[in-house]
Image (cartoon, coloured by chain):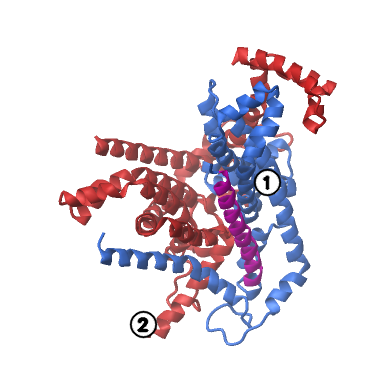
Amino acid sequence: MTRGNRILLSCIYWAFVLYVFVPLLLMILMGFKDSKFIGFPIKSWTLDWYLGVFSDAEVVSTLTYSVVIAVLSTLISVVVGTWIAVLLEGRKFLGRAAIFGLTILPALVPGIISAIAFRIYARLLGIEPGMGAIIWAHAVHNVPFVALVVMARLSTLPKSQIEAARDLGADPIIAFLRITLPYLIPAVLGASIFCLLLSFDDFVRSFFLGGYEPTLPVLIFAKLRSGMSPEINAIATVALVLTAAIGIWAERFTRRTNKDAKP
Amino acid sequence: MSNDATTRREGAGVAPEHSDRTFWGWLCVWAPYTALMKLVTASPRRQFIILAAFPILWVLTQHLGPMLQMLRVSLTDAYPVAPGVEQHFTFDNYARFFGEQIFWQPFFRTLIFAGVLTFCTLILTFPVAYFLARHVSRKNQMLMLLLLLIPFWVGEIVRTYAIMILLGNTGAVNLVLKWFGLIDRPIPFMYTSFSMGVGIVYLTALYMLLPLYSALEKLPKSYGEAAADLGAGAWTRFRRITLPLTLEGISSGCTLVFLISTGFYATPVLLGGPSTTVFAETIAGFFHVAGDEWPTGAAFATIMFVTAMLLTGAFQKLMHTLRKGDTK
């Protein structure tokens, strides 16, 4: 590990940081350009595009629509994912490996195939394309992430705590509600935020299962197909700020609770 | 487990005597609840069934169901079935794939593309992960990793658009090149396999970086030092120690990135051109038109899924044997 080596590696790291940030920063910058055409150089600046976003009824209703879908699908994923985790963690039974494999299946199926499979299955279940179908697809797709996160947390719960509760007369349900569930809260919250972001950012499932009303990524996609404009930059920046803020907050939150949890 | 349950039930009967007035104390003695609990915990077997029934039903109907239904539809000649038409079992949809070049060409293009891009992502992120895991203090590691995480919370479409702005004819890259006098006329990066590749690597880099980082972080520094004391050069140390001991991270990172890159739809549509059509676009095409093309689309999706699973499975197996061979 020579000094030169270290400097070279650090340069690579910072180059990677640039590679990751510069495109997004340029995109944000372009939303302030006082011209209809995307591209450099930027000669004069304006806030009009951003003001336009918040006064555009379509964008605002799309944003609400996306948030509602994200929240409802997350609620389903969290309940189902936690339930599966409680069943799988620390229990041995016939077919456990198969159930575990099936649990993580939706996370492994490549995007387009998962969207197609959901589209076909929605028809079988009689779910019309639209809000319900998107919520359902997002919920199913996000279950594996919740299950994995909750299982990881559950495996660190000392068995003695449950045993103590049971010895003191708690039945399995009360022991679960009073011991297991509070212990799982940080993992459940972390997983919820991850699901919220996954659902809010998802394009391919929303695109194939959506009705006439678009979610935010679908709206941006549709607008992009008819040409780039700073208006799209402003919409995309709003989406970016929202997701990044939630992400950073969640990261800090989970870090703090993890620190607290350590004995 | 069985005798545990009986003692516990007797224990539950004791609880009312404590008569604390909290919600839980009240719940324990509330008749409908105790009756329900008696029913639920009657035997460990019943308890297990009540716990397991819903998750098992869910994964079978919601996780496996869509895949099986896709397979079933791919083997029929018409779906959704119009009234008065009879549905027949057929392999025609699969035969169609091999019959026409416009179908199998995007398929192989997607596989080659995904493979090449996975390799590029690995080469690009390995030094970054190595730097973070080996050359940065523990406290800064988290901060510097977090810095890289931020952009990855941003959605697929927004980041694809960012790449469009970066690589456009009046984009930042062309501007900089022109500024340095390297070119007179903008280079048309967009709508080529290059722009598509940059976009996909941009979207998947994190899924490679995190497994690599956690594998490298677990690797004790002393191994490298010991090898250096014994006279191994930098390259030998890398080849004989770092690489074999991080194969697990490499294997899971590559599997993730490969699977994700085969599934992209919006990014190739926005960043690619007519000569870079990927299989996702081919599959999607069958779902934009009238319903009777669905079986073909389902068949193509099944072909892609099975191939992707077989390839990643074979790859993981290969990495596994490599790992075993090296640690002997």
Give the color of chain A as drawn.
blue
User: What residue is rendered at 66% in x and 36% in y?
Assistant: A181
Q: Is residue A141 magenta?
A: no
Give the color of chain B as drawn.
red
- Front residue of this view, candidates B50 and A236: B50
Above or below, B45 against A162 in this view is above
Above or below, B210 against B183 in this view is above
Highlighted magenta segment, given as a residue range = A233-261
Is residue B101 visible from the viewing direction of this image?
Answer: no
Q: What element does badge 1 sit on?
A: helix
Amino acid type, callout 2: Leu
Give the residue at mark 1. Answer: A74
| x then y, percent, for residue B82 | 71, 38
Image quadrant in which you'd find residue A39: bottom right
What's the magenta bit mostly, secondary-structure-wise?
helix
Q: CA distance from mark 1 to mark 2?
A: 50 Å
Q: What element does badge 2 sit on?
A: loop
Above or below, A42 against A94 in this view is below
- Front residue of this view, candidates B227 and B111: B227
User: What residue is rendered at 71% in x and 36% in y?
Assistant: A125
User: What residue is rendered at 55% in x and 25% in y?
Assistant: A91
